[in-house]
Amino acid sequence: MSQSQSALTLDMFPKPVPERAARSFVGHAKLIGALTLVSRVLGLLREVVAGHFLGTGLVASAFTVAFVVPNLFRKLFGEGALSAAFIPLYSQSLKKDGPTEANAFAAAGVNLLCVILLALTLVGEVALGTAVFFGGASLNPVTLLTLKLTMIMLPYVLLICGTAFLGGVLQVHRRFGPPAAAPVILNVVHIVVVLLGAAALGLGGSGQNARDAVLQTQLVYWLAFFVLVAGVLQILALMPALRDVGFRFSFTTGFWTDPVRKMLKLTVPVALGAGVLQLSVLLDKGISVLFMRGVDAAGNAITHFTLLGHSIRYPLELGAPARLNLAQFLYQFPLGVFAIALATAIFPSLSAEALDADRQRFKSVLRRGIEATLFEGLPATLGLMIVAGPAVRFLFQHGKITSHDADLITRSVLFYSVAIWAFSLQQILNRAYYALHDTWTPLVMSIVTLAVNLAVELPLLWTPLGEAGMAAGTCVSFILQAVVMLYMLDRRVGGLGLAEIVRPVLKMLAATAAMGLACWAVMHTPAYPQGHSWMIWAAQMLVLMTVGAGVYFGVCVGLGLEVMRHVLPKRT
């Protein structure tokens, strides 16, 4: 979703009044959010199943880091720079030049993506193969396994980026369903491979021994191969919808056309911004591996490293990358279901109104978007903090994941949770800047965020926080970025009229506080489930979520919160 859809909104539909625009983007957000919810639930099940059989040890950490590489390129090329530049130009071509010329441009864009990613994949495979062949004997086992798994999954870069790019074509035609549903395929394939693979190998879900490490290694090799299979299936799943909207592949159009050159020019700042963000993700993964304790070939513990003649303690326990990945998955669950869906849906309305002389409609749509974001983000922030303990234990504390692992995951989840409202708000703010054709401010702020993140998290690694220090750094940097970008945007457009949403936000804060107090009271009653079994943890989650949601929505309704009219289902 991007500025592209602004042109369609202006020409294909009547210019919406703010109230109607709010209903429109919230309605689309519900569709996207519902499909994303299915994907996230399956993704959660995927992590549960993988954690059960793989745990958080060296093998799981190697796969986690290796899988970051194709996902990095997906966000950079597929859902990032090229899509953000392609979608508005494709929309304009469809409107002005007609379907034939628009299809030629889209096909040329796909060809360009294939050329770029094929070249990067070949270079990457050569570099990885060289490192494995010449340096394999000197590399520690986890690094060597990570490189080999990366080699297997690197072609997935082309498949997943192609899926995201083709999804952009469908979004211009207002076909949000297939792109939002495509991730379901990867999750289903992942779950099936782990379950069937573990059964075929005889890999159990409890205890840990030397034989398990060998079987886990075999399983992640299978899993890496089937990631490629899932990528092919995702593209095939989009084909019927692409045919319906008239898109056809054409390799005779080439890839170096005038529209493509214009697309590349618009791509640069967005690519740099996306690159900085993904560099931050990659650095966090790399730091978690670099400073993690391990074992040598003889099975001896490695607890210190030498720097400038000084012996320094490794601050992170074995399995930190996998545990941080699970913690990130939990906080990203509400972010993906609500915040990103809302930001995706609101972008056409923001783009349509951004260039008006007085920008009053733009400001109104943005205020409604901020209201809807905080309506979901504030209770999600406190709610995840409340249920973090039982949720982590219920979902992950079984099989290879121990009680100690669950404690460490929970601590990281608490820090990530604090900034859910900021993560959510940032999704809206980025779209607002892009709608104003300002791609440089998000780039500069992403660089600042990266610097703040590293400055905060690195010292905290050697404190009692340990790996949770990385979550704390992410939390601080995103809160700072959201607040500063909102302040700058307010000044840039001559005031967003934020005073109009002070009362609604105060009502949300009051409802969130009431939710927290109600959950705290329930947790201190004799009726609250007590114990240490998966049924107890499930019961605790159910009680807290039911009470929390009931109190929050009840207070919001009682306070007459306006945004409730758009979020709740319409009465028939």
Image (cartoon, rainbow, N blue to C red):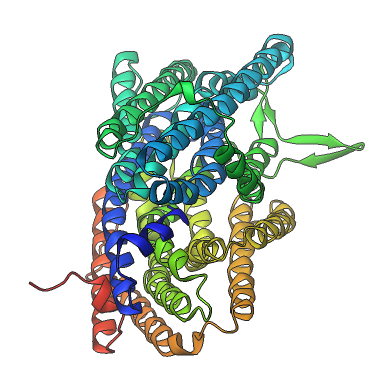
In the image, taking residue 237 as reference, residue 83 lies left or right, namely right
In the image, taking residue 524 as reference, residue 157 lies left or right, namely right
Q: Position of residue 523 (x, y in %)?
A: 32, 71
Residue 231, quarter of the rendered image: top left
Q: Position of residue 79 (x, y in %)?
A: 49, 44
Above/below status of 321 relative to 19: above
Residue 449, quarter of the rendered image: bottom right
Q: Nearer the viewer, residue 324 or 34?
A: 34
Residue 140, quarter of the rendered image: top right
In the image, taking residue 88 as reference, residue 279 lies left or right, namely right
Q: Is residue 57 visible?
A: no
User: What residue appears at the point 61 percent right and 49 percent down from the top-left corner?
Assistant: 266
Q: Please, which residue is most extreme toward the front here?
A: 97
Above/below status of 321 relative to 140: below
Q: Is residue 184 visible?
A: yes
Q: Nearer the viewer, residue 102 or 318?
A: 102
